Amino acid sequence: MDPEIQLSIVIPVYHSETCLEPLLARIHQALEPERIAFEVILVNDGSRDGSWRVIAALCARHAHVIGVNHRRNFGQDNAIMTGLRLARGLFVATMDDDLQHDPADLPRLLAAMRTSDAEVIFGSLEIQTDPGWKRLGRALHARTLEWLLDKPKDFQFTSYRLMRGEVARDIGFYDGAFPFIDALLVQVSTRFEQVPVQVHARFQGRSNYTLLKSLQLWMKLLVSFSIKPLRVVTFLGLFAFVTGVVSATGVVLQKWLSPESFEPNDAGWASLMVVMLIMNGLQMCFIGILGEYVGRSYVLASRRPQAVVAKVINGPAPPR
């Protein structure tokens, strides 16, 4: 942490060569009149366009711009993690690279942080311009966080966020292969606030998040930070097993008390279904219990790298 740097701005970059110069210019316009000392960390996450060339040029002109180049595309959250490890500011902001997040809101987020005891402040989106499936996906994402990690209800988590430097560094210690920033924030803090911000149209192009990528992101959240899904399987197996036992008891009682109601074919079908329910229920219980151990072992033993940095300009290499 460098006390002379008030704000570090971490921006993951992917196929945004035309956005970067206007984005940096607007950051300057927002922060320089407020006399806020800042640094900008641009993490190029394997872009195949000229994004890295533009980042290198910006770093050559501005000493407070740090450029990081990943060897390939690792994902938005992985790129943010790389940037968080390089951030030296008392406060650390994350924002998108497409100018949908307005840098003019950064002073408001900082002012809100300084007048509260919050450790993380999210810029809540006032206007939703995305298609219906994306809004539905955000709602599903929020409900999943609430279920898995006890995220506060009726609280909007967005990628436009400001956190205290110590929180950013606490998150940076996580070295798992599949980081998810919101999930990590929930694990290290509960002191959240939100400030309304304006959402603007993308500066160029379309979102890089397709429906398939959004589903993959949701699956990463579902299986990487909690074993609750495995417990659901266990409970379903237990329910099937209990249903089978109750059904078997009912079949036996009916056979004893009312044998004339059983045709030969009916009796065979009932017995088969009861056996299938009991055995399948037991199998699901065993798989769920085994999954508990496998899941825990996987989380501890997986050493797949979050990202691989090819080059850093104007800054030290991030710790591995």
Image (tube, rainbow, N blue to C red):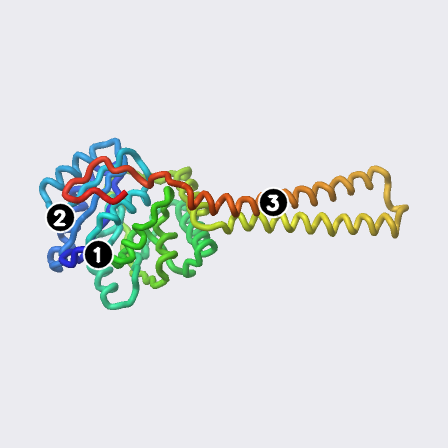
Which residue is located at x 86 percent, y 44 percent?
262
Choose the circle earlier in sequence order: 2 or 1.
2
Query: Dots 2 and 1: beta carbons under 8 Å?
Result: no
* Front residue of 101 and 128: 101
Q: CA distance from mark 3 to mark 2?
A: 55 Å
| Of marks 3 and 2, the one in the foreground | 3
Residue 242 in the image: state x and y as whole percent: 69, 51
Choose the circle earlier in sequence order: 3 or 2.
2
Look at label 2 and name its amino acid.
His
Look at label 3 and name its amino acid.
Phe
Q: Splitting the image into 4 quarters, where does residue 104 fall?
A: bottom left
Q: Is residue 37 above or below residue 96?
A: below
Query: Mark 3 sits on what residue?
Result: 286
Residue 261 in the image: state x and y as whole percent: 87, 46
Which residue is located at x 13 percent, y 41 percent?
58
| Figure quadrant of the N terminus | bottom left
Residue 299 in the image: state x and y as whole percent: 43, 45
Disc sitting over residue 106 in the figure? 1
Task: Tell which residue pokes out farthest to the top in this image.
Answer: 48
- Quick one: SS at disc 2? loop
Which residue is located at x 14 percent, y 43 percent?
314
| Figure quadrant of the C terminus | top left
| Of marks 3 and 1, the one in the foreground | 3
Look at label 1 and name its amino acid.
Leu
Query: Mark 2 sits on what residue?
Result: 64
Q: Is residue 116 above or below residue 151?
A: below
Q: CA distance from mark 3 to mark 1?
A: 51 Å
